[in-house]
Amino acid sequence: MTNNNPATSLYAQLAEPFPAEEMFDLIPNVVFFVKNSAGCYVSVNQTLVDRSGRKSKSELIGCSPSEILGSHLGKGYEEQDQKVLQSGQQLVDELELHVYQNREVGWCLTAKRPLVGKNGDIVGLVGVSRDLKLPDVTSEDFERISEVIEYAQERVANPPTLAEMAEIAGMSIYQLDRRMKKLYDLPTGQWLLKIRIDHASQLLLNSDRSIADIAMDCGYADQSAFTRQFRRTTGQTPSTFRKLRE
């Protein structure tokens, strides 16, 4: 039977595998990686090398995140990988606060997809994490929602509802979401989560306040709810994250 898939036909003509890794080397605000079924790197782009504090890709290949980033930073990534590898479900636009070995910190949207072998088994995964962009504060879109942005930022301890924010902006929730995505790459709900975790991370690193107090200051009813959300977003518990200042 003739295979009429244009992609298959093209790949068959290549002298070497399609160089996706090299293409991602040209995009400095995106981390790219492929991992095997054990969760170890088999392909990475230069951005991940740089942010891991390493000098070459060879230092990452065959290693797990914990071996590269240390157990404090790597464990959360490994747990997320195992969920994808075991469930076969892809992860799409997961909001994450990444902290690398070189102590670079940044917000990303992460996507991971399982790789299926010829026998139907999951043999690994491919993933990308793209940095959130900074909003253009000179744009008309930002001017339209600047009041509601300021309103929410001043009320981290008692976050407004989406309906409240839309009313202040004089828009529907859908219209507000569209502008937020255009400016921040995030819908309104995820942006609210981001500013709360941002505030919490700064308090954890720059103050000696108790985790319970920080949870209340960031709008969480109890410490356990805060810990669950913080761990999901950063891959670490608040107490582990606080150790990064040591």
Image (tube, grey):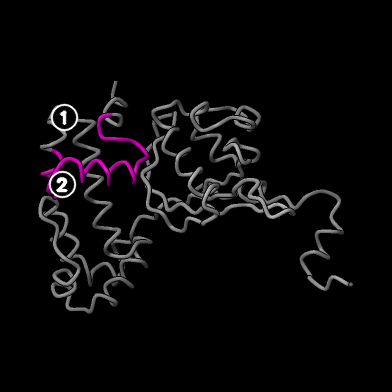
Q: Is residue 235 magenta?
A: yes
Residue at the outermost top position: 246
At label 2, counting other C-alpha atoms closer than 10 Å, the crowd grade (few under 14, some 14-19, many 20 or more) is many
Rendered residue at 84%/55% (across/down): 14
Q: Where is the N terminus found, in terms of image quarters?
A: bottom right
Label for residue 68? none
Q: Position of residue 26 (x, y in %)?
A: 61, 49
Q: Are marks 2 and 1 in contact (CB under 8 Å)?
A: no
Q: Please name the residue shown 20% across and 68% down the image.
A: 162
Q: How many numbered tags mark residues here?
A: 2
Q: Position of residue 11 (x, y in %)?
A: 80, 59
Describe the element under mark 1 as helix, strand or loop: loop
Identify the image quadrant of the C terminus: top left
Q: Read off the magenta span.
A: 214-239
Q: Which residue is mark 2?
A: 218
Q: Disc 2 versus disc 1: distance between alpha carbons?
A: 14 Å
Residue 36 placement, left or right of 69? right
Question: Is 210 left or right of 142, judged from the image as shown?
Answer: left
Which mark identifies residue 207?
1
User: Residue 94 location, x and y as percent?
Assistant: 41, 54
Q: Does the magenta run of residues contain 76?
A: no
In the rendered structure, which amino acid carries the disc numbered 1?
Answer: Ser
- The disc labelled 2 sits on which kind of residue? Cys
Judged by its main secondary structure, the magenta piece is helix
Q: Looking at the picture, tell me which residue is in the foreground, 131 or 89.
A: 89
Left or right of 60 on screen, residue 19: right
Helix, strand or loop at label 2? It is loop
